[in-house]
């Protein structure tokens, strides 16, 4: 027999070639919206893990509203879910992986609280054998028929969402398995009783799947079936029952079958005296027909050796679970020969694109390694922790000495078999001998080992707090030279600068992630007379930059702040470059006459690039960041700052002592009440801001007597995708895109200031427009890939085809583009006087369009400061020890902000705040 190679292609029975034998296993993420629709976090999660791996099987989609077996499940139950599901499929497929989605119904495993207090349904009115399980309502014969139709409709939706295939979920004790099980199905009609009758439901689901594929799909649509090989219950499914069903399914046609087990070489859980792996029994028992169908193995596959073991023992494809969560590029790492340990550092959630609900799910929680445990001492004693793997709950006593892990005991050992006890004792020895929970796991028992290690980690954190208390300290009452409130670009830059000048700083962030609105920044960072401009032969001046910003702000900008901003912009570009954040690519934005918008050379959006680089610098310096912690008050005595009051996620209130505070909490664009207070005309507008942009910093500072300025100056951005409030970067227009109306005509200078472009769109009869561009713009702006992955983009090979898709008259649109292309060649826009961003004719297909309209984007108003970033009171006197930077500040931008100036603002004034706060405490 030829040895199977995991990296070689495999052809399925329907003729589809999978580029390799590796699959990302379907795993519960709990990350959908409450009604089952798709979140952007979920799209990003799957996109990050696609590409090198051959196939991704998306977590199970329920077929009706009584079918979700866990919170945050995604739905295949209605046509309005298709659009969101299509975004997941596209996010996977665009990077070259096959996209398959599971189809299921939870049946009696559904908890009533998940379905509005209703009773679940099942084949029979028999509760699942688990504590406090609800008794399901038995489906009538007509309801069974209707349920099968619901599975068919779910398959249709998967096809229309452009998935490459579906996996019928006949495992994990869900409804399909319930119909086949003699334990849960004790019906007396044709759907129950004999084993042949109990096969009817899974076979009917497969039949309707084939029919739907013939009607709506193509011959290359993949159909798989997942199964749990045995049940412990008496009566229950035994392995020969499973083989009987699989043979019948194989006769009707499948492209693969998929074991559902915790380990690839698991033996029988019923006949525990027989150590033979079930895959070995499967290979020995299967018919020639079933042997033609590839079989997928799953369970604790982490390294190359696990892949090889699976293939050598009879599997044709190998599904990888938690390793794909911990390592989105798992396939590449294995291909490069890396030896991986299964853990996730506690500060890596955002980087790994793991949605918050999944992060807190036991599947992932047991993998998390607390990066803040280094150099901590313990209070000697015993700490009892409860932890879970995929099957069991363990109660573990961890005994800690003053500076080492002394012992571990499995309190509920009597509940487990010898294999579990052996694994516990082995991992216990490893942890104690290395005095660390960060040890290698046992092959074949990774989930259990990670649970055991998690117990030790939790105990260490508690013991460290107890040690501080025992010495008379308060672990929740901390002291720092400077407290920085907000972890966007301004706060991070201030922290790095202050730290490098010798101060002890902490960043406090009310959200669960760092980055704030900076994460959403897309265009770039404006600066004049930079080294990167000079390298590209761009002649610019600070005075011109000042003049154009003042004009853009309608002469309402604070002259002193603007002069400091312009004069220090090139130094800020240099500072970023020295710290590994190089913005050497240059484009332009509306209101600028010169290319001075600095961005990554790749053309990527500046926000994520900037935050990633700043956070790396924060980590390298060991600067503490407190997440999910809300600063509610600045404390003072005798007009000097003494601390801040904070509220933590659990509701507890604490004081952090400090000598100075830097407020960098951003604007109030996500505070609908505050926006409408100052601008009632903006009621109903979507906002591009993250949900933490509530103006909390302004409120805190006003309590200290801080003055405010320009609070009514709220900018709407002209190009916002309205269904998601996602901003389409100004760099797309700066790169050569145009705006067209539903009539197919240009109507504005696309790179006029944002307020003017927004007003022009709002004045159109339809109140929306399309941003239109060609392949040249896409090639030069990587942010377009994000828009494509989010399904914002309409694409066509010709202008005529694009016009048809947009319901625009093709002749009008063709004439509009032809006229604009002539303006490009002549470098003169006769219609609207555009002079910048006229880079290429729009003539290289494919052609693209995104439907947009204005949305609330930036609040130019905020607290008053001087060029030293000191906060001023209502009489323009300095409030000692209090500094502010970023969008929380007013005056820099006047009545309208120029695109690219916000990123410049946060870095320039963030650095200044870090320096001036340090200067202040050194004079304290």
Image: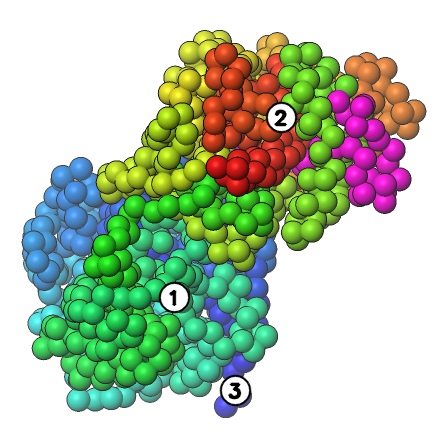
Q: Nearer the viewer, residue 780 or 252?
A: 780
Q: Where is residue 183, by image quadrant? A: bottom left
User: What residue did someone put label 3 on?
Assistant: 3
Q: Earlier in the sequence, mark 2 or mark 1?
A: 1
Q: Where is residue 694, by image quadrant? A: top left
Residue 122: percent from left, percent from top = 15, 52
Q: Nearer the viewer, residue 153 or 524?
A: 524
Residue 813: percent from left, percent from top = 74, 23
Look at discs 1 and 3 and give the one toward the viewer.
Answer: 1
Residue at 13%, 40% in the rendered image: 118
Q: CA–CA distance between discs 2 and 1?
A: 40 Å
Residue at 37%, 76% in the rendered image: 439
Q: Which mark is residue 867?
A: 2
Q: Residue 132 vs residue 262: left or right?
A: left
Task: Write down the region rendered in magenta.
Answer: 517-546
Q: What kind of colouring is applied to the model shown?
A: rainbow
Instruction: Relative to 72, say whether 257 is above or below.
Output: below
User: What residue did someone put label 1 on?
Assistant: 375
Residue 525: percent from left, percent from top = 68, 36
Look at discs 3 and 2 and give the one toward the viewer.
Answer: 2
| Secondary-structure class at tag 3 | loop
| Disc 2 packing (10 Å; few <14; some 14–19; many ≥20) | some
Q: Are marks 3 and 2 in contact (CB under 8 Å)?
A: no
Q: Is any atom of residue 478 visible in this view? A: yes
Instruction: Relative to 82, say whether 671 is above or below.
Output: above
Q: Where is residue 76, by image quadrant? A: top left
């Amino acid at each position: 027999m030829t040895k199977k190679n995991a990296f070689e292609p495999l052809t399925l029975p329907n003729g589809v070639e999978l580029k390799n034998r590796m699959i990302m296993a379907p795993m519960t993420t709990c990350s959908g919206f409450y009604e089952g629709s798709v979140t952007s976090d979920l799209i990003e999660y799957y996109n990050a893990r696609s590409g090198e791996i051959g196939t991704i099987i998306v977590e199970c989609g329920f077929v009706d509203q009584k079918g979700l077996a866990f919170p945050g499940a995604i739905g295949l139950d209605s046509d309005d879910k298709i659009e969101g599901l299509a975004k997941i499929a596209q996010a996977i497929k665009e990077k070259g992986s096959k996209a398959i989605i599971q189809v299921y119904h939870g049946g009696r495993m559904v908890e009533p609280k998940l379905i509005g207090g209703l009773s679940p349904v099942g084949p029979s009115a028999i509760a699942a054998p688990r504590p406090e399980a609800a008794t399901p309502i038995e489906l009538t014969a007509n309801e069974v028929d209707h349920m099968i139709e619901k599975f068919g409709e779910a398959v249709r939706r998967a096809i229309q969402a452009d998935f490459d295939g579906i996996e019928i979920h006949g495992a994990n004790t869900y409804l399909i398995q319930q119909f086949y099980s003699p334990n849960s199905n004790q019906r007396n009609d044709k759907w129950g009783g004999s084993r042949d009758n109990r096969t009817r439901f899974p076979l009917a689901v497969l039949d309707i799947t084939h029919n739907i594929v013939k009607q709506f799909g193509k011959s290359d649509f993949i159909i798989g079936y997942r199964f749990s090989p045995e049940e412990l219950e008496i009566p229950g499914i035994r392995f020969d029952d499973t083989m009987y069903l699989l043979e019948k399914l194989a006769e009707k046609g499948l492209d693969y079958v998929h074991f559902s087990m915790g380990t690839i070489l698991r033996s029988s859980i019923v006949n525990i005296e027989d150590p033979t792996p079930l895959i070995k029994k499967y290979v020995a028992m299967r018919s020639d027909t079933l042997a033609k169908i590839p079989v997928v193995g799953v369970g604790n596959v982490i390294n190359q050796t696990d892949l090889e073991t699976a293939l050598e023992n009879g599997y044709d494809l190998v599904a990888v679970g938690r390793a794909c969560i911990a390592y989105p590029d798992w396939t590449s790492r294995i291909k490069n020969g890396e030896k991986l340990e299964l853990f996730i550092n506690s500060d890596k959630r955002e980087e790994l694109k793991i949605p918050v609900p999944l992060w807190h799910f036991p599947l992932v929680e047991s993998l998390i390694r607390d990066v803040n445990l280094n150099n901590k001492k313990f209070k000697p004693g015993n700490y009892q922790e409860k932890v879970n793997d995929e099957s069991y709950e363990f109660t573990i006593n961890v005994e800690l000495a003053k500076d080492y892990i002394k012992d571990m005991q499995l309190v509920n050992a009597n509940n487990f078999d010898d294999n579990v006890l052996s694994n516990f004792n082995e991992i216990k020895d490893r942890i104690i001998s290395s005095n660390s929970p960060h040890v290698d796991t046992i092959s074949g028992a990774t989930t259990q080992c990670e649970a055991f290690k998690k117990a030790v980690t939790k105990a260490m954190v508690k013991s460290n707090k107890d040690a501080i208390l025992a010495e008379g300290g308060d672990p929740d009452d901390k002291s720092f030279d400077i407290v920085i409130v907000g972890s966007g670009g301004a706060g991070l830059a201030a922290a790095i600068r202050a730290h490098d000048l010798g101060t002890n700083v902490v960043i406090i962030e009310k959200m669960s992630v760092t980055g704030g609105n900076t994460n959403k920044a897309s265009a770039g960072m404006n600066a004049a007379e930079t080294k990167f401009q000079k390298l590209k032969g761009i002649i610019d001046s600070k005075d011109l930059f000042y003049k154009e910003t003042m004009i853009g702000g309608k002469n309402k900008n604070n002259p002193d702040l603007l002069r400091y901003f312009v004069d220090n912009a090139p130094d800020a570009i240099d500072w970023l470059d020295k710290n590994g954040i190089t913005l050497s690519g240059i484009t332009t934005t509306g209101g600028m006459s010169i290319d001075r918008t600095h961005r990554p050379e790749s053309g990527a959006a500046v926000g994520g690039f900037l935050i990633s680089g700043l956070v790396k610098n924060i980590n390298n310096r060991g600067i503490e960041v407190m997440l999910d912690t809300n600063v509610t008050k600045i404390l003072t005595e005798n007009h000097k700052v003494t601390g801040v009051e904070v509220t933590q996620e659990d509701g507890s209130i604490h004081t952090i002592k400090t000598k100075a505070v830097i407020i960098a909490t951003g604007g109030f664009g996500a505070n609908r009440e505050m926006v409408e207070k100052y601008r009632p005309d903006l009621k109903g507008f979507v906002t591009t801001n993250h949900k933490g942009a509530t103006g909390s910093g302004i409120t805190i500072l006003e309590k200290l007597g801080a003055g405010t300025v320009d609070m009514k100056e709220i900018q709407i951005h002209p190009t916002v995708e309205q269904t998601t409030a996602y901003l389409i970067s100004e760099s797309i227009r700066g790169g050569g895109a145009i705006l067209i109306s539903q009539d197919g005509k240009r109507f504005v200078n696309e790179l006029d200031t944002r307020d003017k472009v927004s007003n022009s769109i709002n004045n159109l009869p339809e109140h929306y427009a399309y941003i239109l561009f060609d392949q040249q713009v896409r090639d030069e702006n990587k942010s377009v890939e994000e828009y494509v992955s989010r399904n914002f983009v309409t694409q066509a090979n010709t202008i005529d085809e694009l016009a048809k898709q947009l319901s625009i008259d093709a002749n009008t649109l063709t004439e509009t583009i032809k006229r604009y292309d002539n303006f490009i060649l002549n470098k003169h826009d006769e219609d609207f006087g555009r002079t910048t961003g006229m880079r290429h004719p729009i003539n290289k297909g494919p052609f693209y369009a995104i439907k947009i309209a204005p949305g609330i984007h930036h609040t130019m108003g905020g607290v008053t400061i001087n060029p030293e970033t000191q906060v001023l009171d209502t009489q323009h006197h300095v409030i000692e020890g209090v500094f502010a930077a970023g969008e929380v500040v007013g005056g820099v931008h006047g009545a309208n902000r120029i695109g690219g100036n916000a990123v410049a603002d946060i870095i320039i004034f963030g650095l200044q705040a870090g320096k001036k706060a340090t200067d202040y405490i050194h004079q304290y």
